Amino acid sequence: MSYLNSLKLEINGDSCSRVNFLVPLEIFDLLGLDSPAENYDGDASDGYDAVSSSAGALDILLIGDDEIEADKIKVTLEKRGYRVKFLSFKDNIQNYLPGDLKAVYLVTRDVNELAFGTAIKVSSSCSFPIVAAGPGWTRTMVLKAVKYGISDILLTPASEETIEVNVNNNLLKKA
């Protein structure tokens, strides 16, 4: 297993590109990153507040306006042992970033500028996977999403199997 870290490269104030570093987990003693947190009992919505809170750390943050799809993703993630919290686009997401998050899912009814703006906020704060989940993706929207830091797209409505494949691709296979 490896850990992928992505950074924006600037030289003399000019933004050049993104640089990706692929690091074997053993080098930095990061072997726990490829598995969900252990020894967790309870509902993910109980006691999870901002990063500065002592209530505990989150693994996955779901942000969006499609609560039905977000709930399906949340259930699938919780079955695998991840601690998940859902926020609306109106909530202050900066309180949760970067924290100990392993990924952020942007779950929308329609792909729009609000989702892209949120992707920009998240990608500027963190280097973990950002997955956009929503219906009706076009080639133009996909290119825009990649430009704004989204690393993968999950078409909705999605089955539990599709969600599990997406989780495997983004959380377990960091290389």
Image: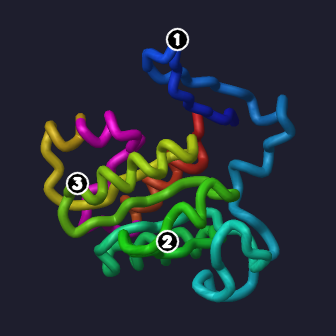
* Mark nearer the N terminus (2 vs 3): 2
Residue at x 29%, y 42% (from the top left corner): 145
- The residue stretch that appears in magenta: 144-160
Q: Secondary structure at mark 2?
A: helix
In the rendering, at what x and y percent does residue 138 appear? 13, 44
For badge 2, the amino acid type reads: Thr
Q: Which residue is mark 2?
A: 76
Using residue 151 as the reference point, say whether residue 54 is left or right of it.
right
Depicted 13 relative to depicted 135: above or below: above
Using residue 39 as the reference point, say whether residue 4 is left or right of it.
left
In the rendering, at what x and y percent does residue 27 appear? 84, 29
Depicted 78 relative to depicted 10: above or below: below
Q: Which residue is mark 1?
A: 12
Q: Which mark is residue 113?
A: 3
In the rendering, at what x and y percent does residue 70 appear? 38, 73
In depth, the one of 81 and 67 nearer the eye is 67
Name the quarter where the C terminus is drawn: top right
Q: Residues within 10 Å of mark 2 (few under 14, many from 20)?
A: some
